[in-house]
C-alpha cells in the first residue's frame, strides 16, 4: 500500500458512509407454526445488517464480538416485509459499535412499526485474523451525535458487566 492509499484507508469517515439498509420478505421457512417470525431468524438478519455497516466503514473483514440485550416489540407475520437500517455509532480502537433498527412493514395495511433495536460490537481483522485499528467515524447530525455519546456509556456498561461475569466464573 503506498502513502496515498494508506491515507485514504485511515482517514476519518462520516457516519453516513456506513449507513446500510436491508429488506427481507418473511417466508414460511422463517416462521413458527403460528406464522410468526422466529426470533433467531431476526437476530441473524440483524447481525448481517450490522456487519454491512461495519464493513462499509472499516473497509475490511469484521467479526461480531457481542450483541447487547434485545427486545422484540411486536409480532411479525409471514408475508410482512422486515426493513433493517444500520450505521456505525462510534469507533474505539479495533472495535466499533453499530446500531441496527428494525421495522415491520405491512403493505396491505400500509403500516410500518418498530420491531427491535440492537447494538452490536464488531472487531476489525485482516485476512490473517489479526485485529486492526479502525478509522474514526465522524457524527454529523444531532441523532448521530447522540448515538456517538451513548456508545461510550454503553461500552463502559459492557466492560463492567464483562468483568463481573469473569469474577463470577473465577
Ligand atoms: C472478538 C475477539 C476478536 C476479541 O478478541 P480479544 O482477544 O478478547 O481481544 P481484546 O481483549 O484485545 O479486545 C479487542 C477489542 O474487542 C473489544 N471486545 C472484546 N470482547 C468484546 C465484547 N464481548 N463486547 C464488546 N467488545 C469486545 C475490546 O473492547 C477491544 O476493543 P478496542 O480495540 O476498540 O479497544 C475474539 O473474542 C473473537 O475472535 N471472538 C469470536 C468472534 C466470532 O467468531 N464471532 C462470530 C460469532 S461466533
Image (cartoon, rainbow, N blue to C red):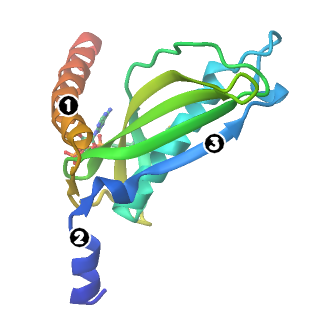
- Checking the image for residue 150, the label placed there is 1
Locate ligand 1 by image quadrant.
top left
Report which residue position mark 2 lands on. Answer: 10
Q: Nearer the viewer, mark 2 or mark 1?
A: 1
Q: Which tag, 3 or 1, sits closer to the chain's start? A: 3
Tell me if mark 1 has few (under 14), some (14-19) or many (20+) residues whose alpha carbon lies within 10 angstroms of its own. Answer: few
The answer as to whether callout 2 falls within 8 Å of ligand 1 is no
Q: Position of residue 62 (x, y in %)?
A: 42, 53
- Checking the image for residue 101, the label placed there is none
Quadrant for the C terminus in the image:
top left
Residue 129, visible in the rendered structure: no
Report which residue position mark 3 lands on. Answer: 23
The answer as to whether callout 1 falls within 8 Å of ligand 1 is no
Q: Secondary structure at mark 2?
A: helix
Quadrant for the N terminus in the image:
bottom left
Q: Residue at x 44, y 36 (%)?
A: 100
Q: Nearer the viewer, mark 3 or mark 1?
A: 3
Q: Is residue 164 left or right of residue 24?
A: left
Q: Quadrant of residue 166?
A: top left
Note whether 77 is above or below 51 in the view shown: above
The answer as to whether callout 3 falls within 8 Å of ligand 1 is no
Q: Residue at x 47, y 15 (%)?
A: 71
Q: Quadrant of residue 124?
A: bottom left
Tell me if mark 3 has few (under 14), some (14-19) or many (20+) residues whose alpha carbon lies within 10 angstroms of its own. Answer: some
Q: Nearer the viewer, residue 58 or 15?
A: 15
Q: Residue at x 38, y 46 (%)?
A: 87
Amino acid at each position: 500500500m503506498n502513502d496515498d492509499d494508506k491515507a485514504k484507508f485511515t482517514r476519518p469517515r462520516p457516519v453516513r458512509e456506513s449507513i446500510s439498509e436491508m429488506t427481507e420478505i418473511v417466508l414460511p421457512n422463517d416462521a413458527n407454526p403460528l406464522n410468526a417470525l422466529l426470533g433467531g431468524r431476526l437476530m441473524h438478519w440483524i447481525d448481517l445488517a450490522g456487519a454491512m455497516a461495519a464493513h462499509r466503514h472499516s473497509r475490511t473483514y469484521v467479526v461480531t464480538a457481542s450483541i447487547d440485550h434485545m427486545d422484540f416489540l411486536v409480532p411479525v407475520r409471514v408475508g410482512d416485509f422486515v426493513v433493517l437500517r444500520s450505521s456505525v455509532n462510534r469507533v474505539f480502537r479495533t472495535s466499533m459499535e453499530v446500531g441496527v433498527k428494525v421495522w415491520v412493514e405491512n403493505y396491505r395495511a400500509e403500516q410500518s412499526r418498530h420491531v427491535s433495536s440492537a447494538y452490536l460490537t464488531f472487531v476489525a481483522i485482516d485476512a490473517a485474523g489479526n485485529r486492526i485499528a479502525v478509522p474514526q467515524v465522524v457524527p454529523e447530525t444531532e441523532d448521530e451525535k447522540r448515538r456517538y455519546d451513548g456508545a461510550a456509556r454503553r461500552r463502559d456498561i459492557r466492560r463492567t458487566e464483562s468483568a463481573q461475569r469473569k469474577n463470577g466464573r473465577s
